[in-house]
Every structure is written in structure tokens, then in C-alpha cells.
Amino acid sequence: MNNELFSQLMESIEEGGAILRGEAEPSRTFEYPDVDVKELRERYKLSQDKFASLLGISPGTLRGWEQGRRRPDGAARVLLRVAEKHPRAVLDTVRGDARLAAKGVSPQKKKEAKAEARA
């Protein structure tokens, strides 16, 4: 790495540290609006129990999100955004798992079968 690139890198690291310590403002920020969970569920005409099951969460957690007592975060927030923009992807995944479960095939057994087929 040449000296000019190293200097730019160090300057960037120092700027990031100042932002994290609250000594400087970031030059840009990214906002991701929350998904309206109740509106999304109602759009797909699902009960709270069915929608919670689809997402792999408890109905109580879903109620908390819908009533604004709690907010989804992390993977749940990403999954809700995927469900909002690409519902077919979520439905195809869940339906596939449900079909396997009905046949008595666990996700682990499915992985093992795929590994054996590759060997």
C-alpha cells in the first residue's frame, strides 16, 4: 500500500472514530422505515396466529409489534421487509418446509440427504 492510500485510510478511520464518539456528524445516513406489520398481515388476509406461524414467531410477539409496544429488529426486521417486497419467496420457503414436515422429513435430514447425493 502506498503512502497516499495509507493516509486516506487513516483519515477515514479517525473520522469514523470521531463519529462514533459523537464528536462529528456523519456525511450521510441511511434510513430504513419500519414495516407496518399489521397492514402487511391484513394485506395477505392472514390471522395473527397464521402470520406469526409463517414468520416463526409467537402470536404474542406479533401482537406487540402490531400494537407498537415492541419493534422487530435484526433478522425479523429483514424477514418482514422480504415478506413485504417479495412475499412469494417467503411463502415458497415456508411451504417447502411444511411439505417436508408433513412427510416426516426434518430440515436436518434434508441436508444430510443432499450431502449424501453429492458424495
Image: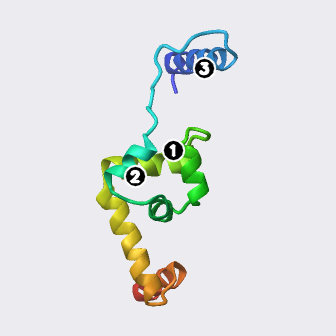
Marks 3 and 1 sit apart, C-alpha to C-alpha, by 36 Å
In the rendered structure, which disc, 3 or 2, sits on the residue that comes first in sequence? 3
Q: Which residue is mark 3?
A: 16
Depth check, mark 3 against mark 2: the one in front is 2
Q: Residue at x 59, y 46 (%)?
A: 64
Q: Which amino acid type corresponds to the residue marked 3 in the rendered image?
A: Gly
Position of 42 relative to 13 (above/below) = below
Marks 1 and 2 sit apart, C-alpha to C-alpha, by 10 Å
Residue 71 spot, x, y in % from top left: 57, 40
Disc 1 residue crowd, few under 14, some 14–19, many 20+, Cα 10 Å: some
Residue 49 spot, x, y in % from top left: 50, 63
In the rendered structure, which disc, 3 or 1, sits on the residue that comes first in sequence? 3
Q: Are marks 3 and 2 in contact (CB under 8 Å)?
A: no
| Left or right relative to 57: residue 95 | left
Q: Residue at x 43, y 40 (%)?
A: 35
Q: Quadrant of residue 24?
A: top right
The kind of secondary structure element at disc 3 is helix
Picture quarter with the C terminus: bottom left
Instruction: Using the image as rendered, state which of residue 67 and residue 103 is in the foreground.
Output: 67
Position of 85 relative to 27 (above/below) = below
The kind of secondary structure element at disc 2 is helix
Q: Quadrant of residue 58?
A: bottom right
Q: Which amino acid type corresponds to the residue marked 1 in the rendered image?
A: Glu
Disc 2 residue crowd, few under 14, some 14–19, many 20+, Cα 10 Å: some
In the rendered structure, which disc, 1 or 2, sits on the residue that comes first in sequence? 2
Residue lying at the far right in this picture: please name it. Answer: 21
Q: Which amino acid type corresponds to the residue marked 2 in the rendered image?
A: Arg
Q: Which residue is mark 1?
A: 66
The kind of secondary structure element at disc 1 is helix
Label of residue 41 in the image: 2
Instruction: Using the image as rendered, state which of residue 97 and residue 5 is in the foreground.
Output: 97
Q: Are marks 1 and 2 in contact (CB under 8 Å)?
A: yes
